[in-house]
Image (cartoon, coloured by chain):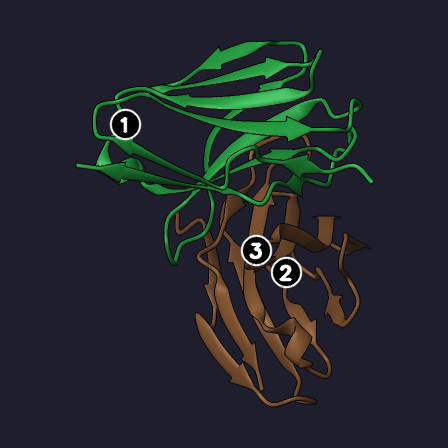
Chain colours: A green, B brown
Amino acid sequence: GESVGLHLPTLSVQEGDNSIINCAYSNSASDYFIWYKQESGKGPQFIIDIRSNMDKRQGQRVTVLLNKTVKHLSLQIAATQPGDSAVYFCAENSGGSNYKLTFGKGTLLTVNP
Amino acid sequence: NAGVTQTPKFQVLKTGQSMTLQCAQDMNHEYMSWYRQDPGMGLRLIHYSVGAGITDQGEVPNGYNVSRSTTEDFPLRLLSAAPSQTSVYFCASSWQGGGTDTQYFGPGTRLTVL
């Protein structure tokens, strides 16, 4: 079946370094992708999204890259801070659905001071 | 705005008991949804609603009922709790559909079924 997955379940970086979290998706019909951050004991928090008609989108300290050719999504965090430590999820709109999201299993990012 | 609120934060049930997880949003969002989160499984969609009076099944609907009598509220009912329903439950809402715009999540309800 179609699924969204992450290449790395854990990532440990030094404070100030840049972080890259990767995600693979297999449903070529998906056209909306989102990254969420989830801190321990809290609900997922929206970080950034991108639609399939774009290949790059930037936010504050974050950039999402979309490579539709190889069905790959990445989240780049610049100058990673201890407050960035969390689990990061990518999600896709299940084959282009207006109503359903399929989430990846998550990557735990740990920022060392 | 309070955003998306959920009650209770924690709940322990015995097998066979029933309960309702409450979810409310004050952003006038049309779309609301329920997810469960299990270790190593990511978030899985249980039920969703595109507006008052309209609900539909997600990926894992068995054992759960929902209703949407108002725009603001979207309760999730467990009619006969089972240990397999031990999980963290999140409610979310968005302006339109969950697949087209940002979903805002509540803080979650941690449910344990003994």
Q: Earlier in the sequence, mark 3 or mark 2?
A: 2
Determine which quarter of the picture holds residue A97: top right
Determine which quarter of the picture holds residue B83: bottom right
Left or right, B1 with reference to A22: left
Report in which chain the residue with disc 3 lies.
Answer: B
Instruction: Please tell me which residue lies in front, A48 or A17.
Output: A17
Badge 3 vs badge 2, beta-carbon distance below 8 Å: yes
The residue type indicated by label 2 comes to Phe
Location of mark 1 (residue): A80
Q: For label 3, count other residues whose C-alpha is less than 10 Å away and answer few (under 14), some (14-19) or many (20+).
A: many
The residue type indicated by label 3 comes to Cys
Q: For label 2, count other residues whose C-alpha is less than 10 Å away and answer few (under 14), some (14-19) or many (20+).
A: many
A27, above or below B20, in the image: above
Badge 2 vs badge 1, beta-carbon distance below 8 Å: no
Which quadrant: the N terminus of chain A? top right
Q: Residue at x 68, y 40 (%)?
A: A101
- Tag nearer the camera, 1 or 3: 1
Residue A24 pos. (x, y %): 64, 28
Disc 1 to disc 3, C-alpha distance? 29 Å
Residue A19 pos. (x, y %): 36, 25
Location of mark 2 (residue): B74
Please determine if labels 3 and 2 lie on a single subunit: yes
Q: Is residue A60 visible?
A: no
Circle 1 SS class: loop
Residue B33 pos. (x, y %): 65, 52
Left or right, B9 with reference to A85: right
Report in which chain the residue with disc 1 lies.
Answer: A
Rendered image: mark on residue B91: 3
Instruction: Please tell me which residue lies in front, B68 or B108.
Output: B108
